[in-house]
Image (cartoon, helix red, strand yellow):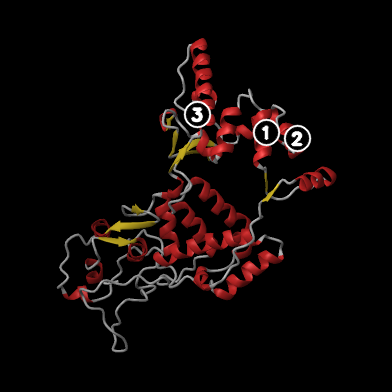
Amino acid sequence: MTVAEAMALPTVTDLITAGKALGIGRTKSYELARTGTFPCRVIRAGITYRVPTADLLAMLGLSSPSVNRPEAMQPVALHRPDAPGKTAAESPAPDAPSSGNNGPVAHPGAAAAPHPEADGEGVTVVAWLETWLSWARLRDTTRRSYAGHVRNHLRPRLSEVQLADLDVPVLGQLFAGMLEDGVTEATVRRVYCTLRSALNAAVREQLIGDNPARYLQVSLGRRPHAVVWTRRRVKDWRRTGKRPAVAVWTPAQTRRFLKAIAGHPLFAILQLIASRGLRRGEACGLRWSDLDLDAGLAYISRQVQRANGVLAICPLKSAASTRVVALDPHSVAVLRAYRRALEGYAAAHGISLSRYVFPGPRGRTAEPGAPDQDFRQAGGCREASPRTAA
């Protein structure tokens, strides 16, 4: 890179170009940026890193050079003496202007275009996946899911594959091998989506020219088909102990179940979930301010999830999940009676009523899995079984 090329960089440049000017390879640049030890100030923008050109020029001692000087037309080593990597004299930059007549000479005002392989260092697929996961804007649950895909499926099969060598045949062998090893089609599809997202980010970072995953057709997989607990299925389940992958109660069975748990502390939340179709996390995130019992409406706008061992209030699963749910008269009556019971308990113990409709310990958010766990511990699973419901 010449002085002119350095001076012609935009106000903010990408990390690879800044690292190249300092004699630092791409992989090392990302490693230093992640740990906050890159020689210059680094700005993180989404999943990308950017370096202010003024800081880069100051590091290079080029705060106010004149690009019209004769030496500005010649390749120079823009590397810090203590920066890792070779100097320009030891290893000329691949895009440096030629001093002979066999190639084009860079115009003094032209900025050097970043080249994915300019520093000659290879980036493995797994290294990029882990780097991308540390940057990507993902929900905690999504990040954990993606990390599981990398840990369980992609790292064992792609540990030695370079990112630049990843192509359609390699991907085809990857997913065919997963199917041969007994991985379900649905899981293969999810792993494919994770890898495709990571490769899209690699294209945006100019690490690869194209995403080979977009040329691959991966089966959507077969989701278990929900069946109804008919009398015959209940009879077969009682005889063999085997049950369908997904089975739902009939309205009559649901009514029988709710009747069986009437008076149970979990009755209100289970009745609301069963009758109005709320997810457990949505029910646990419901606040009294979200309810208009006079109008018979519930405003669903948040959910509770466990992230890294901590309960957290999170956005809903999708934009369409934000909705207003009409409450039937029976649900309204159940919620009014439930609130009166909570108010009586709070008054008797000298505590304030929690803002959450279904609070956990100390009035905080409830664990989304608590209704299932508590109900089983209370022996309610027998009442909930299709044997009783049928």
* Label 3: how many Cα within 10 Å (few below 14, some 14–19, many 20+): many
Asked if the residues shown at circle 2 and circle 1 are in contact, with their CB atoms under 8 angstroms apart, the answer is yes
Relative height, residue 382 to residue 43 (above, below): above
Q: Where is the C terminus found, in terms of image quarters?
A: top right
Badge 3 element: helix
Pointer 2 or 1: first along the chain = 1
Instruction: Tally the marks.
Output: 3
Q: Amino acid at mark 1?
A: Phe
Residue, disc 1: 257
Q: Earlier in the sequence, mark 1 or mark 3?
A: 1
Residue 352 quadrant:
top left
Q: Position of residue 211 (x, y in %)?
A: 47, 70
Pointer 1 local density, CA inside 10 Å: few below 14, some 14–19, many at least 20: many
Does residue 338 sit above or below 189 in this rendering? above
Q: Residue at x 46, y 20 (%)?
A: 353
Across and down, in percent, residue 104 comes to 28, 84
Question: Label 2, on which residue?
Answer: 388
Q: CA distance from mark 2 to mark 1?
A: 8 Å
Evaluate if marks 3 and 2 touch, with contact meaning CB atoms under 8 Å apart: no
Specify whether residue 362 is in view: no
Residue 245: x and y in percent read 70, 50
Residue at x 51%, y 56% (from the top left corner): 130
What's the distance in space between the residues labelled 3 and 2, CA to CA? 27 Å
* Amino acid type for the residue under numbered disc 2: Thr
Q: Which residue is mark 3?
A: 332
